[in-house]
Image (cartoon, rainbow, N blue to C red):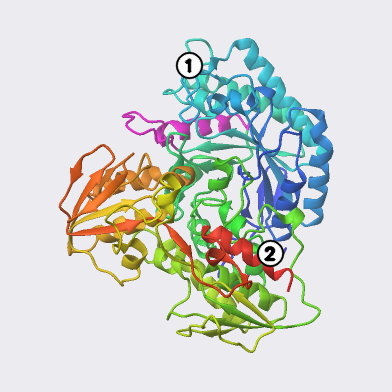
Amino acid sequence: MTAGPTPYPHLFSPIKLGPCVLRHRAIIPGHSMMMSHFEPGVSDRLHAYLLRRAQGGAALVGIESAPVHESSLNFSAASVFSDDAVPSLRRLADAVHQAGSKLSIILWHGGHNISHRYGASHAVAPSMIPGPRTRETPKVITRREIAELVNAYAAAARRCREAGLDVLEVQTATDYLLGNFMSPRLNWRTDEYGGSLENRMRIVVEVLEAVRDAAGPDIAVGVRTSVAHHIPGDPDDYDIEDSLPCMKFLDERGLVDYVSLITGSHWSFPQTIPPMTMPRAGLADEAAQFKAALSVPVTVAGKIRTAAEAEAILSAGQADVIAMARTWIAEPDWMRKLESGREAEIRPCMSCNLGCIGFVARRIPGTCVLNPVTGRESATPPITRALTPKRIAVIGGGPAGLEAARLSAERGHTVTLYEANGNLGGQMHLAAHAPNRGEMLPALQWWANELRRLGVNVLLNRPVRLDEKLAADVVIWAVGAEPAITQVWRIRPYLPDGIPGTAGLAHGRDVLRGAVTAHGKVLVIDEEGGWPVVSLAETLNADPRVTSVLVTTPEAALGGPELDLTGDSALVVPRARANGIVTRSNTLVTAVENGMATLDNGERIGPFDTIILSTGTRPRATPEDTLAIGDCLAPRGIYGATNDAERITQTL
């Protein structure tokens, strides 16, 4: 490939990782997303997902962490501990090469993060430290088992060589097995595998020597590692003072062709996969220290979203290669669009972690709430021009309406979008303007730009009556949802009229859109959890007319359980506490009277100057037997909205 557009000369320049030459410096690292697959090798779902990114211009496409041994069996979408993995790996490698990209894989053992519930009989680790998420106490791995594991890494590398892969990456990041050995905090051994730096690195050296020997001279071998583990409360945390010497130790022995950097551990998930409130390109400065100290190329990841951010890191000499996972989950054509001068068409990642991480946390294959085709490439036909163009009217400009209008226009239809308010986005617009949620704004801007580019006629401040006749062949209703008490019924279906005494109280979404103001001491009665109550509480807390905010919730913590699944709770809960927002967890309000609230334990709290409900939504009215999508069909959030739009527009 020739040098790219002048704004990004470093991003478009080639780079050599050992024997592997990449045509530019934007790669997709292996990342756990397409899971629920216990067969050896690569599933059809993962094959289609990765190939689509190769076709989108990624220089190197990474297969997620692949178990090298049965003791690391989990919900991974790929495994390499059997020769049966070779055919599917070879099929993927051939397809990726034909698309002009290179293929890598992460050779992995999960250590104490493996659970017997995932399929392995038990976890193993250098020391008897339970996994922070599994809570299971591991078996201390023996010397014999270490030797067996080293052989397993070699066998996995041999299979990858036979399949034609280009890059092998040994996982030493976070608190997976090899990362635990490297950390003096997590490795308490007194034998030759513990204590000094040389001893703690012994298993990593043995693994890399075995992998390099099995891989042969034509495959690049690198490591992925954590800059720090960020264990909360640890006064002597594993950090760059430990991780950098570990990488120098490998570099000086000629064992690695590159080093790939992330940070964090299972004690600090938001550091590893940064949510929207974490800074962009947060590892750039640390990467610069590795680059200055090592003789091999350094790859850096960590919420790098735009070409300008990638170019800034490269031009400053902070790293040699940019690794972007969620960026490409949202936009498979990231590099192709950049190459062809269509940067404005790149669908942005919001770092919401709702589809990619939240789905996987539920043990279902990951996706993207802005791009529901992600993860379903093998079952979703590409967008094609309609044989008979139609006049399409889309009623409502929230995520469902925006995506339906965009996809309809892509298919060649003439589209008019009617929005009752003066802005696009619906409830997403409210969320994007709440504290700490500004990463959603680029997505709304992208939709607006796409509708403009595709010639969609957008009519703002234009409500449509239920009985109104529009000049259209197809009318799609996407008018969203309105505040309601539906989530009260989730726990207490015996309260059809809601919590006694709450009739007529304001709802959180009315506060967010500025239709209702609060003052003084505020009580928020939460029964829906997630971002709606967090955005409401933080909006109220930032209002100078409000003196205090108390939230009652049946969940274990503010924003649960949704934010537990996305990794946001670890940031939201302490932030709320630090800002003075008080949460009464595992609590239900049974009645409200005269500014007082009665709790399910009989306690009465108050008086409050303002009481606000965060109790869910219900579909807005649509004409009977109409074509409805998104929350006006059934409230399900952004993914439900975009997924409906994608499904419906295929039939138009």
Badge nearest the viewer, 2 or 1: 2
Q: Secondary structure at mark 1?
A: loop
The quadrant in which residue 213 appears is top right
- Position above or below: 76 against 202: below
Residue 489 within the segment the image draws in magenta? no
Q: Is residue 281 left or right of residue 596?
A: right
Work out whether mark 2 precedes mark 1 in sequence or the reverse, and give the earlier one.
1
Name the residue tied to disc 2.
647
Q: Amino acid at mark 1?
A: Met
* Side of 603 where 482 appears, left or right: right
270 is higher (above) or lower (below) than 332? above
Amino acid type indicated by mark 2: Arg
Find residue 410 and report its horizontal and vertical position in percent. 69, 76
Which region shows up in magenta?
Answer: 228-255
On the question of residue 3 being in view, the answer is no
Circle 2: element type: helix
